[in-house]
Amino acid sequence: MTSFFSDVKEAPLDPIFGITTSFNADPRSNKVNLGVGVYRTANLETAVLHTVVKAELLLSELGPSREYLPMDGDARFVARMAEIVFGKPMEEIDGLYGTQTIGGTGGLRIVGEFLKGKLSKEVIYLPDPTWANHNAIFSAAGLRVEKYPFYDPATYSLAHHALLAELNRLPHGSAVLFHAACHNPTGVDPTLAQWEEIAAIVKERSLLTIFDSAYQGLGDGIDEDAKAMRLFQRQGLQFFACTSNSKNFGLYAERIGALFINTRDEQEAANVGSQVRTIVRAAYSNPACHGAWIIEAILSNKRLRAEWLGELSAMCSRISEMREALAEALTQMRPDRNFTALLKQRGL
Ligand code: PMP
């Protein structure tokens, strides 16, 4: 019998999940997986946050219905996340549309579809280097992926001048992605003053910004890690912000995040939202409820919210301690080299 599938070749391993597969298959006990951006305790566990356990107990008592969520997901969750991202109530931000997404990845893919299908963009500019999946996500949405200089390997820091020069060379209206904080993989972020320079060029050349915010709260805190998005919002720039709750709530497997689109006014926000919903409806119809409800239960409860901020700051401190220990160990092995850049970099 002939097979429909005989010509299908095995696809290459995903660069990040592929390392996890090799890691699991490796019999050695003294191994550490540095390939995937997942927070682990000293016992190498990805523990469930205490606040998440408490929220789940509350939810099990309430026993909410599992009727479909709307295409934009749970509006209460989206409003809570808008406040975390922008530092003020959603209704105070004129022209802001928000929707619940399937993790940060889901939001990025919707943005890709929107850029290509609704705004007729052909190209997206990504930092060099960037999270490996960015290339796959935006290529799958039909965009051509180009790079802009971001990291200077000679100084282990931002390629500040090359970055600004390249942004100044991009065609007007180009779509450009920035990591909001804790740049993956370099851990290098612009300072507020550098973000102001970037914002000035974005305005001048009418660049269309896409923020990828996967680590809010794991760098220098909730407010500090959102400073670029808040600056762009204050300056009245239009942009997309894809946020993820995988890391800051430890809800990796719940696949929960949000996408915000800052438009000029309420009418534009409504129109843009209606177009996003056409993408969502044809892709997965509507998102799942559980992760959104956990986050809403934590953020709407003063005590749980404070406890969550404490858990987040404990994760942050441990990441800093690990950076210090790594820098120290490397310095002992190679006293001729300088590893202090590791202490300045942020994120996983
Ligand atoms: N963007 C960046 C930069 C990331 O590192 C990650 C996750 N590693 C994501 C997006 C995707 O996040 P999620 O798991 O929520 O889809």
Image: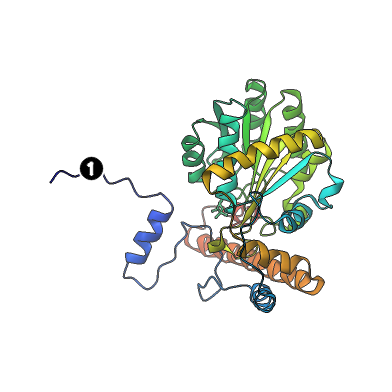
Observer able to see residue 237: no
At horizontal 36% and vertical 60% (from top left) the residue drawn is: 21
196 left or right, relative to 207: right
Q: Which residue is mark 1?
A: 4
Observer able to see residue 86: yes
118 left or right, relative to 89: left
Based on the displayed image, in which of its 4 quarters is residue 279 positioned? top right
Quadrant housing the C terminus: bottom right
Based on the displayed image, in which of its 4 quarters is residue 322 positioned? bottom right
- Residue 142 position in % (x across, y down): 49, 31
- Residue 71 position in % (x across, y down): 63, 49
At horizontal 19% and vertical 45% (from top left) the residue drawn is: 3
Q: Which residue ends up furthest to the right in the rendered image?
A: 92
- Residue 209 position in % (x across, y down): 67, 35
- In the structure shown, which secondary structural element does the residue marked by tag 1 occupy? loop
Mark 1 residue type: Phe
**Residue 108 or 320: which is nearer the viewer?**
108
93 left or right, relative to 98: right
Q: How is the image coloured?
A: rainbow
- Residue 187 position in % (x across, y down): 60, 50
**Residue 39 or 341: which is nearer the viewer?**
39
38 left or right, relative to 264: left
At horizontal 65% and vertical 76% (from top left) the residue drawn is: 50
Vertically, is 11 above or below 272? Answer: below
Number of residue marks? 1
**Residue 22 or 71: which is nearer the viewer?**
71
